[in-house]
Protein backbone atom coordinates (compact mmCIF):
# COMPACT_ATOMS: atom_id res chain seq x y z
CA UNK A 1 0.00 0.00 0.00
CA UNK A 2 2.77 2.36 0.93
CA UNK A 3 4.62 1.84 -2.37
CA UNK A 4 1.40 2.47 -4.30
CA UNK A 5 0.89 5.78 -2.51
CA UNK A 6 4.50 6.86 -3.11
CA UNK A 7 4.20 5.87 -6.78
CA UNK A 8 0.97 7.85 -7.16
CA UNK A 9 2.53 10.94 -5.58
CA UNK A 10 5.61 10.75 -7.81
CA UNK A 11 3.45 10.31 -10.88
CA UNK A 12 1.27 13.30 -9.96
CA UNK A 13 4.31 15.50 -9.32
CA UNK A 14 5.65 14.79 -12.82
CA UNK A 15 2.49 16.27 -14.36
CA UNK A 16 2.11 19.25 -12.07
CA UNK A 17 3.18 22.54 -13.58
CA UNK A 18 4.69 24.73 -10.88
CA UNK A 19 3.95 28.44 -10.94
CA UNK A 20 7.05 30.45 -11.79
CA UNK A 21 7.26 34.12 -11.16
CA UNK A 22 9.15 36.17 -13.70
CA UNK A 23 11.64 38.95 -13.07
CA UNK A 24 12.27 42.10 -15.08
CA UNK A 25 15.19 44.30 -14.11
CA UNK A 26 17.13 47.37 -15.25
CA UNK A 27 20.25 48.93 -14.00
CA UNK A 28 22.46 50.23 -12.93
CA UNK A 29 22.17 53.69 -14.41
CA UNK A 30 23.42 57.11 -13.41
CA UNK A 31 21.68 60.38 -14.21
CA UNK A 32 24.37 62.79 -13.08
CA UNK A 33 24.77 65.20 -10.18
CA UNK A 34 21.26 66.66 -10.59
CA UNK A 35 19.35 63.35 -10.27
CA UNK A 36 16.72 63.44 -7.52
CA UNK A 37 13.99 60.98 -8.58
CA UNK A 38 13.91 57.41 -9.88
CA UNK A 39 10.75 56.15 -11.59
CA UNK A 40 10.27 52.53 -12.58
CA UNK A 41 7.42 51.87 -15.04
CA UNK A 42 5.67 48.65 -16.07
CA UNK A 43 3.26 48.20 -19.01
CA UNK A 44 1.08 45.14 -19.58
CA UNK A 45 0.92 44.61 -23.36
CA UNK A 46 -1.05 41.37 -22.96
CA UNK A 47 -4.76 40.59 -23.10
CA UNK A 48 -5.13 39.43 -19.48
CA UNK A 49 -4.19 40.89 -16.11
CA UNK A 50 -0.78 40.19 -14.56
CA UNK A 51 -0.12 39.92 -10.83
CA UNK A 52 2.69 42.24 -9.76
CA UNK A 53 4.32 40.61 -6.74
CA UNK A 54 6.85 43.36 -6.06
CA UNK A 55 8.64 46.30 -7.63
CA UNK A 56 11.56 48.12 -6.04
CA UNK A 57 14.36 50.58 -6.73
CA UNK A 58 17.86 49.74 -5.45
CA UNK A 59 21.15 51.61 -5.20
CA UNK A 60 24.47 50.23 -6.42
CA UNK A 61 25.17 48.32 -3.20
CA UNK A 62 21.72 46.71 -2.99
CA UNK A 63 19.89 49.01 -0.59
CA UNK A 64 16.19 49.22 -1.38
CA UNK A 65 15.01 52.83 -1.51
CA UNK A 66 11.80 53.91 0.24
CA UNK A 67 8.95 54.34 -2.18
CA UNK A 68 7.19 57.71 -2.19
CA UNK A 69 4.54 56.63 -4.69
CA UNK A 70 3.55 53.21 -6.03
CA UNK A 71 0.50 52.07 -7.97
CA UNK A 72 1.93 48.69 -9.03
CA UNK A 73 0.46 46.55 -6.26
CA UNK A 74 -1.90 43.70 -7.05
CA UNK A 75 -3.02 43.02 -10.59
CA UNK A 76 -2.02 45.09 -13.61
CA UNK A 77 -4.90 44.99 -16.09
CA UNK A 78 -4.35 44.49 -19.82
CA UNK A 79 -3.02 47.51 -21.70
CA UNK A 80 -2.41 49.41 -18.45
CA UNK A 81 0.74 50.81 -16.92
CA UNK A 82 1.93 51.47 -13.40
CA UNK A 83 4.96 53.00 -11.72
CA UNK A 84 6.92 53.22 -8.51
CA UNK A 85 8.84 56.34 -7.49
CA UNK A 86 11.71 56.92 -5.06
CA UNK A 87 13.80 59.95 -4.11
CA UNK A 88 17.47 59.32 -4.90
CA UNK A 89 20.85 60.96 -4.32
CA UNK A 90 23.49 62.27 -6.68
CA UNK A 91 26.68 60.30 -7.14
CA UNK A 92 25.00 56.88 -6.92
CA UNK A 93 23.75 54.47 -9.59
CA UNK A 94 20.29 52.89 -9.38
CA UNK A 95 18.47 49.78 -10.56
CA UNK A 96 14.87 48.55 -10.67
CA UNK A 97 13.54 45.02 -10.13
CA UNK A 98 9.98 43.85 -10.72
CA UNK A 99 8.59 40.40 -9.92
CA UNK A 100 5.35 39.34 -11.61
CA UNK A 101 3.27 36.22 -12.15
CA UNK A 102 4.45 36.25 -15.76
CA UNK A 103 6.65 38.64 -17.69
CA UNK A 104 5.93 37.46 -21.23
CA UNK A 105 3.80 40.55 -22.02
CA UNK A 106 5.32 43.01 -19.56
CA UNK A 107 7.57 45.84 -20.63
CA UNK A 108 9.26 48.35 -18.40
CA UNK A 109 11.61 51.26 -18.07
CA UNK A 110 13.68 52.88 -15.33
CA UNK A 111 14.17 56.66 -15.48
CA UNK A 112 16.34 58.99 -13.43
CA UNK A 113 15.06 62.58 -13.38
CA UNK A 114 16.13 65.99 -12.16
CA UNK A 115 14.01 68.28 -9.95
CA UNK A 116 12.13 69.61 -13.01
CA UNK A 117 11.11 66.09 -14.08
CA UNK A 118 13.53 66.06 -17.01
CA UNK A 119 14.73 62.51 -17.82
CA UNK A 120 18.50 62.39 -17.38
CA UNK A 121 18.95 58.69 -18.19
CA UNK A 122 16.75 55.66 -18.79
CA UNK A 123 17.03 51.95 -19.37
CA UNK A 124 14.61 49.19 -20.37
CA UNK A 125 13.75 46.42 -17.94
CA UNK A 126 14.69 42.99 -19.32
Image: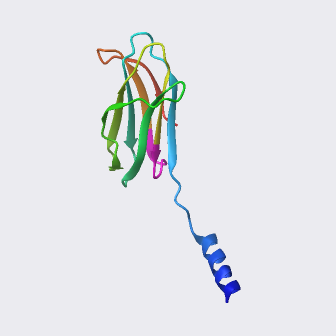
Against 125, residue 22 (above or below) is: below
Q: Residue reaching furthest bottom? A: 1
Give the total number of marks visible in the rendering: 0
Against 28, residue 120 (above or below) is: above
Using residue 11 as the reference point, say whether residue 63 is left or right of it: left
Residue at 44%, 39% (x, y): give it: 107
Image quadrant in which the N terminus is located? bottom right
Is residue 85 at all visible to an observer of this figure? Answer: yes
Using residue 45 as the reference point, say whether residue 71 is left or right of it: left
Asked whether residue 21 is drawn in magenta, I would say no
> What residue range appears in magenta?
99-107
Q: Residue reaching furthest right? A: 3
Using residue 106 as the reference point, say whether residue 118 is left or right of it: left
**Image x and y of residue 91, in percent:** 48, 13
**Image x and y of residue 102, in percent:** 47, 51
**Image x and y of residue 29, in percent:** 50, 22
Image quadrant assignment for residue 54: top left
Towards the viewer: 63 or 83: 63
Residue at 53%, 55% (x, y): give it: 20
Asked whether residue 106 is drawn in magenta, I would say yes
Against 105, residue 86 (above or below) is: above
**Image x and y of residue 125, in percent:** 49, 34
Residue at 64%, 71% (x, y): give it: 14
Is residue 46 at all visible to an observer of this figure? Answer: no
Q: Report the coloring of the rendering.
A: rainbow
Residue at 43%, 36% (x, y): give it: 56
Amino acid sequence: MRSILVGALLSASMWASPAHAGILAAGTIYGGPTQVTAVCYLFNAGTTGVVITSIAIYDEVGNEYPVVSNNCSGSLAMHRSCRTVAHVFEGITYACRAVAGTTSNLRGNLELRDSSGYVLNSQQLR
